[in-house]
Image: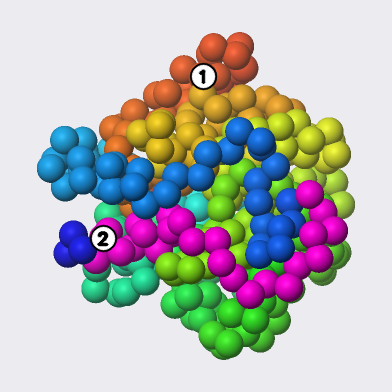
């Protein structure tokens, strides 16, 4: 089992940069072989650093056991009835991990859907879900659009995407380099986007915006496909979904370009150890600073409480987030700390 776990981690943190992408490098984040982060201080941790971290985990020096945190993450079993009826109000429902249901102007949008029991290349091993999805897939309203921030297994879960295709035939928006792979896996309507590209779907304007992260599903495809975030703009309201990201200047750039963001859905988990995670994942304080940079009205924290992917104490995430709000003198009423399965209507 440890070998399987190590292979899983290696598959998303591999050091190989070779690929066959035909890229003309017309933009600063494009390379001959794929894509790169724009932060000149970005540190790409390779396999040696991965072994250093994982070996400590296997020696139980800093392992986290979900059974030590009973009741830390309450789950509401959302029947979906209100969501299926809603045609007018902006709403956000946290399904779990980075999966959220956004309803805006009658359009139903899922972010990084994962209903699977594991986020792994294989179904029998790898990081296991320890809180169930907050709403069953059969209870969802009709899904019109799926936003996929990047191709890591906990964000691009094929079995969930294929089930959504079967049930709803939605449109899938992805970063550059992911379309052919998803079409080959049975999805029918896939559109690729570069950073700052915009597209209009069912009256909703969608922009694909930068993050500081990386991509890769195997041993040889790191940085070959593009990662990013999304700004969803309706007639009156805007929602930002960050996917996975470290802290960098892109938050201020997005906030400057897209004024009056109503809700920012931001990751707060999977941030320890900082020496290993800081180049690709924000910690709670950085997430709150990102919220301030975006100048959004409300923040919904996600990316915690579902899978154990890192070393922070599982009950520390929200207290640290609230502490960061106080440190920046931001009204805690602007933090919408949803339970898994909980919906907020605006």
Residue 141 to residue 54: above or below: below
Q: Position of residue 197 (x, y in %)?
A: 83, 58
Which residue is at a point 75% across and 31% down the rendered structure image? 252
In reply to whether residue 19 is colored magenta, the answer given is yes
Relative horizontal placement of residue 55, taking residue 14 as reference (left or right): left
Which secondary structure is most common in the magenta stretch? loop
Which residue is at a point 77% across and 45% down the rendered structure image? 238
Which residue is at a point 36% across and 59% down the rendered structure image? 10
Q: Secondary structure at mark 2?
A: helix
Give me the disc on residue 5.
2
Relative horizontal placement of residue 167, taking residue 35 as reference (left or right): left
Q: Position of residue 12 (x, y in %)?
A: 43, 59
Farthest residue toward the left?
59
For the N terminus, which image quadrant?
Answer: bottom left
The residue mark sitting in front, 1 or 2, is 2
Q: What residue does disc 1 label?
A: 324
**Stretch in magenta:** 4-28
Along the line of sight, which residue is nearer the eye, 273 or 85? 273
Which residue is at a point 16% across and 47% down the rendered structure image? 58
Residue 279 to residue 119: above or below: above
């Amino acid at each position: 089992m440890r070998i399987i776990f190590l292979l899983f981690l290696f598959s998303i943190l591999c050091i190989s940069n070779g690929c066959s992408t035909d890229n003309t490098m017309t933009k600063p984040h494009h390379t001959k072989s794929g894509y790169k982060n724009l932060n000149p201080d970005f540190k790409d941790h390779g396999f040696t650093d991965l072994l250093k971290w994982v070996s400590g985990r296997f020696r139980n020096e800093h392992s986290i056991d979900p059974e030590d945190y009973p009741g830390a993450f309450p789950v509401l079993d959302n029947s979906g009835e209100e969501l299926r009826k809603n045609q007018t109000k902006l709403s956000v429902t946290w399904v779990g991990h980075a999966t959220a249901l956004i309803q805006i102007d009658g359009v139903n949008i899922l972010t990084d859907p994962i209903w699977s029991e594991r986020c792994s290349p294989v179904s029998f091993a790898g990081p296991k879900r320890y809180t169930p999805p907050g709403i069953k897939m059969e209870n969802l309203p009709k899904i019109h659009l799926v936003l996929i921030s990047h191709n890591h297994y906990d964000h691009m879960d094929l079995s969930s995407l294929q089930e959504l295709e079967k049930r709803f035939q939605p449109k899938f928006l992805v970063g550059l380099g992911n379309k052919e792979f998803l079409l080959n896996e049975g999805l029918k309507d896939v559109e690729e986007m570069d950073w700052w590209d915009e597209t209009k779907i069912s009256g909703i304007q969608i922009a694909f915006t930068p993050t500081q992260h990386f991509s890769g599903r195997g041993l040889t495809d790191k940085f070959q496909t593009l990662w990013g975030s999304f700004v969803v703009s309706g007639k009156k309201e805007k929602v930002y979904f960050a996917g996975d990201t470290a802290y960098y200047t892109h938050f201020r750039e997005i906030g400057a370009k897209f004024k009056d963001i109503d809700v920012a859905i931001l990751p707060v988990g999977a941030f320890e150890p900082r020496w290993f995670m800081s180049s690709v994942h924000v910690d709670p304080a950085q997430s709150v600073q990102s919220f301030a940079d975006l100048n959004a009205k409300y923040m919904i924290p996600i990316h915690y409480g579902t899978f154990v992917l890192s070393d922070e104490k599982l009950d520390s995430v929200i207290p640290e987030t609230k502490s960061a709000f106080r440190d920046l003198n931001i009204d805690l009423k602007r933090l919408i700390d949803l339970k898994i399965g909980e919906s907020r209507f605006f």
